[in-house]
Image (cartoon, helix red, strand yellow):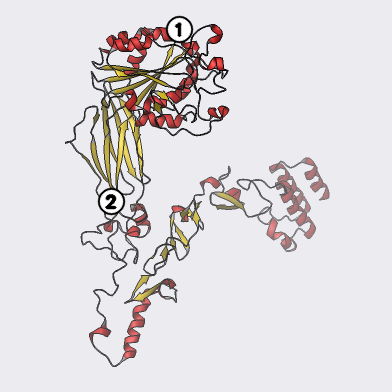
Amino acid sequence: GSFSPDFLDGAGPSQRCDLPVKLLRRGCGPEFMEQSEIKVEVNATVSSTQVSPRDISITLRPGSEASVIVAVKQLERYPVDLYYLVDVSASMQENLDHLKTVGVALSLRMTEHSSDLWLGFGSFVDKPVSPYINVHPSKINNPCSDYEIRCRPAHGFHHVLSMTGNMSEFTRVIKRQRISGNMDTPEGGLDAMLQAAVCQRSVGWRPEAKRLLLLMTDQPSHLALDSRLAGIVTPHDGLCHLENNVYTGSTRMDHPSVGQLSDKLLENHMYSIFAVEKQQYQWYEELVRLLPGSYLGKLGLFQAPNLIELVVDAYKVQSTHLLYFLCNFFLIFVMIQKASESVYFNITIGMRSCPDDGEDEDVTVLVRPVGYNESTIVRIHSKCRCSCGPMRHCNDDSQSPCKGTQDSSNQEQRPDHGLIKDSDRDSNRNCRGDGSDVDCSGRGVCECGRCVCEQTRLGTVYGKYCEIDDFSCPYEGGLLCGGRGVCVSGECVCEDDWTGDSCGCSVSTATCQSANGLLCSGQGRCVCGKCVCEDPRHSGDFCERCPSCQSTCQSYWKCVDCHLSHGLSQKEAGHCNNTCAPLVGYMDDVSGTATLANRICSEHNCTLGLCTFVVLWI
């Protein structure tokens, strides 16, 4: 901000407070600039377990930035909730059998990392409507009737077992599960994942635990808009729709989009694990790139040892993703550094600009590592208002320009009113710029020798003579004067390296240099970094092409022809002076002219026919 008393007379604080480079461009001296201090303060009173620090305060000004480091360390022996979400279509029969032995074995293996493991279970197939399932009456209740096997009806999602630390109960529930069946290849896995994530009360996710959502399938999954085949066009609302542990929205709403599923997993602190067979690995490899905090395992068989190692590996993976809120006026940049036990996020927050009203603004940014239920609060205080120097002197439009000045007409009553008028006239001359015959550029009134600029809905008028504004000049890229100049008297006054009506042209001529080192081949001018050819016969990026121009030989031949036509003496050859004098010397006889013609032909590699013609003519 500027606290110079004469800087931008009539301007409000929003014009006097700006980036240093812009204040310098507008004529503010560095000695009058007020620089707000950048501060970073950590509140050490707020305790943390896995994410630290938990509370940070930052003070920024426009154009400045500050960096903080957030450390994420997964505690040992941390509680874990693992929910098995299993595809129970007919092709998964063998894999379901393998799962029946995994509960106790996984519990024993995880004691190395966590002393508090809870497991839950749910199943899915697909939306139970045509064309995803066979809707023949004999197939609806038993999709496997052709094989004389009793199968479960197809279902979008069944929540079977809430989180429990009882491994025997988990094993008992798994052993009771039976397969189902459907028609098409893709399954409703993403639809079921969203319900398992958002139905926290039914599933029993613990607030303090690390949450792992494991999807087991041997097929790809349906995506948003696939449900149009069944006449289902209502987008998913992202809410829980479980009644008696059955997903009731399966036949009413579309599959969730990948973006919607990602948001819900982040919102509910979920790590997603995909256990898929090798044939589907590539499909899910593309999917996990769009789901922060997800982990993919390629399994040949869903046997207990393979599943256990997949879960343990996913548990040990450290989060390298952050979820944060971003405001219009700030820019956040994150760098990641991994250590053996921790991940460090170097977060740089920069302030791009101030609000339009120029007021200070406090913004809270919530920074949360994906999959963790702890976060860091970053409180940003923006310094947009200026204290205007040690004397607290700010230019305020509400202040009268006569305040603090002595008006001789008020000190005493003078009979000579003409003298007072002359004094007022002299004072008003201070309200006119050089060459102007209008007070305050016609956009203000002159009071006590100073301009009070008018207020307009179009924008702000300011300056010593109300000659500057922020609305009446050409725009480029949505910015007045392209953001590279100041609008003075309706014309853009550009920065040093820019020119043009809207300051959109670079004054650099480097892009106009032709191969011979000349500017535009010596045939044009460099305008906005491009050659403008002065001779209409010339063209090309550097005015280097001229199909209709005569060759050098032809030009010189015309000189010889001119001398022959008008005589050889200097007096008679005066007609040739304009074009030939710089090219050839005058010859006293015909043999001299012949010598000249031969020299021209040899120096410029002219064709033999042209030279012969010249010599014979001579």
Q: Is residue 253 left or right of residue 566?
A: left
Q: Is residue 429 left or right of residue 539?
A: left
Q: Where on the picture, by quarter, is residue 245?
A: top left
Q: Which residue is mark 1?
A: 94
Q: Determine whether 495 is above or below 351 in the image.
A: below
| x, y percent for residue 3 | 27, 60
Task: Name the outermost residue toward the front.
Answer: 137
Mark 2 or 1: in front is 1
Observer-nearest of 587 and 400: 400
Image mark count = 2
Q: Which structural element holds mark 2?
A: loop
Name the amino acid, label 2: Lys
Tell me what residue is drawn at x 54 percent, y 17 percent.
185
Label 2: how many Cα within 10 Å (few below 14, some 14–19, many 20+): many
Q: Which structural element holds mark 1?
A: helix
The numbered mark at residue 317 is none
| x, y percent for residue 469 | 42, 63
| x, y percent for residue 379 | 26, 42
The numbered mark at residue 383 is 2
Tell me what residue is drawn at x 42 percent, y 10 percent.
96
Q: Determine whether 330 is above or below 140 in the image.
A: below
Q: Quadrant of the N terminus?
A: bottom left
Observer-nearest of 165 and 586: 165
Residue 431 visible in the shown view: yes
Q: Where on the picture, by quarter, is residue 247?
A: top left
Observer-nearest of 442 and 43: 43
- Sequence-wise first label, 2 or 1: 1
